[in-house]
Amino acid sequence: MNQMVTAVILVMVTYFSGYCVPKTVANLKSSILPPLGRVPAAVECTSDNSKKPENILMRLAPEETKKLQDQDEEVKPGLFEGDIAMDEAMYDKWRVGFRWTNFPDKIWKNGIVSYYISELYNEASTQLIHGAIEKINYMTCVKLIPWDRQTVDYIHIQPVKDPSGCWSHVGRRGGEQVVSLQAPTDYSPGCLASEGTPIHEIMHALGTFHEQSRWDRDKYIDLHRDNIKPNSLQNFKIQPYHKAFTKYPYDYNSLMHYGNNFFAVDRSKPTITPKKEGVSVGQREGMSVLDCIKLNDLYGCFKGHKESYYRRICRTYGVK
Ligand SMILES: [Zn+2]
């Protein structure tokens, strides 16, 4: 229901403010030129408000409401764990590549990641993605820098059409690497309702898996398999102990944790229930305190005299 309300509010704001703007280079914050080669299919974005519904609240039929509620860009079918892109070879080879000692190639060297934000986004979306990047840059020693069109490895943030949704590869792949973030539409905020989802997907690209895929998760959550869509059961697999990074306590508050009704047959009922009382899962506001500490640890940010500095940043700015 919350999603629907959010979407409706977004639509109303969009309608009255003329949210979408012409996509010209001048509108973009990024000063770098478009990449050569592959350009994805465009996400439609129009400034023609005559095409928008006059009042979506009056238009919504029950089946439309259900469709709206089912639109969760992070849980599109066909992707590993819902939002992780992985071809067959990669799946077998390093589906649990969270422990750097086992998968050293997947870390971004020196914590530096070049990025390019597609010009297919409008100004508001571009700014939101920039905001997500600035958060990571501020809270960790990982540095996302604009792609210089020469660096071989970089992430290309774009609204991929097929498969659509919010998704990413895990860790550095080598070469151009897609991070897919759907732009808002009339009916859905896409992957840009807040900075949380862009940060979530970039954290995948930095090498982070979902929190509930930890080998020890059954100590912390109950799964309701009877309410999980059968073809999505694989998304709830546990990663083996020897491959998964579990140095830190289980984090219900992680930005990388599924929400309590992800992949649900009946979305009014949960697929995940925390064993601990009074906690919720699936926040997409931003990095939790522990997400921030873990990412800093993974990227060696605690070396030298920086540990207390970054821990303080994480405690201050991490979602609690
Ligand atoms: Zn994810």
Image (spheres, grey):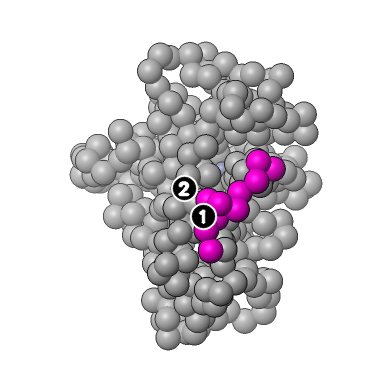
- Type of amino acid at the residue the image marks with label 2: Thr
Looking at the image, which residue is at 30% across and 49% down?
139
In terms of secondary structure, what is the magenta stretch mainly?
Answer: helix
Neighbour class for label 1 at 10 Å: few (<14), some, many (≥20)? Answer: many
> Mark 2 touching mark 1, by CB under 8 A?
yes
- Type of amino acid at the residue the image marks with label 1: Pro
Looking at the image, which residue is at 36% across and 37% down?
288
Ligand 1 sits in which quadrant? top right
Q: Is residue 6 left or right of residue 287?
A: right
Q: Position of residue 174 (x, y in %)?
A: 61, 61
Q: Is residue 269 above or below residue 175?
A: above
Q: Is residue 194 above or below residue 262?
A: below
- Confirm whether the magenta stretch covers residue 252: no
* Stretch in magenta: 54-63
Residue denoted by label 2 = 6
Looking at the image, which residue is at 46% across and 48% down?
6
- Quadrant (top left/top right/bottom left/bottom right) for the C terminus: top left
| Disc with the residue nearer the chain's start (2 vs 1) | 2
Q: Is residue 246 above or below residue 37?
A: above
Q: Is residue 317 left or right of residue 127?
A: left
Neighbour class for label 2 at 10 Å: few (<14), some, many (≥20)? Answer: some
The answer to whether residue 203 is visible is no
Q: Position of residue 268 (x, y in %)?
A: 59, 27
Q: Nearer the viewer, mark 2 or mark 1?
A: 2
Identify the mark at residue 189; answer none if there is no mark. Answer: 1
Looking at the image, which residue is at 59% across and 72% down?
51
Q: Which residue occupies the foreground of this view, 125 or 100?
A: 125
Mark 2 C-beta to ligand 1 under 8 Å: no
